[in-house]
Amino acid sequence: MNIHDGSDMKQLYAIGTLMLILSLLFAGNLNAEVFTVTAYCSCEKCCNKDYSDKWYGITATGKKAKWGTVAVDRSVVEMGSRMKIEGFPKTTFRAEDVGGAIKGNRIDVWFPTHREALKYSAKEKEVCFLE
């Protein structure tokens, strides 16, 4: 029988704790993929709907577009999916809309004005899907 002074147990505990912390940090990124992220607004240029149209600003899920709304390709991202997009750390986005030009690994972020949408150019971003 070996008798230890407790330092071996402390080292094992420290290593185990470190491994747990590292696994938690990296586990969140297992659902991450790279997408081309673009921008749109509710205007006629972006959505082919005039302001007087009763469907102006209404998403494919029937909800009013707002900050956090994104358009996706339904064959790639399930409607209602929640995600974090690199560069927007304080926002959780939700897939609530679709668009004719949104195909494959592309996500269109809704902005409140056309000017803001134009200002945001297409970028390759890491998108982390939340459970």
Image (spheres, rainbow, N blue to C red):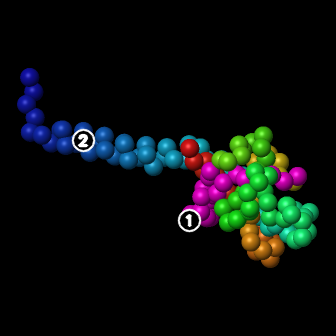
The secondary structure type at the circle numbered 2 is helix
Was residue 101 drawn as part of the magenta stretch in this picture? no
The residue singled out by tag 2 in the image is 13
- Count of marks placed on residues: 2
Q: Left of 16 or right of it: where is 103?
A: right
Residue 60, x across and y down, in percent: 79, 52
Magenta segment = 82-100
Q: Is residue 68 above or below residue 32?
A: below
Badge 1: residue crowd in 10 Å (few <14, some 14–19, many ≥20): few
| Residue 129 appears left or right of 101 | left
Specify the quadrant of the image occupied by residue 37. Answer: bottom right
- Going 84% across and 54% down the picture, which residue do you hit? 99
Whether residue 86 appears in magenta in the rendering, the answer is yes
Task: Name the residue tied to disc 1.
Answer: 90
Q: Quadrant of the C terminus?
A: top right
Q: Quadrant of residue 5?
A: top left
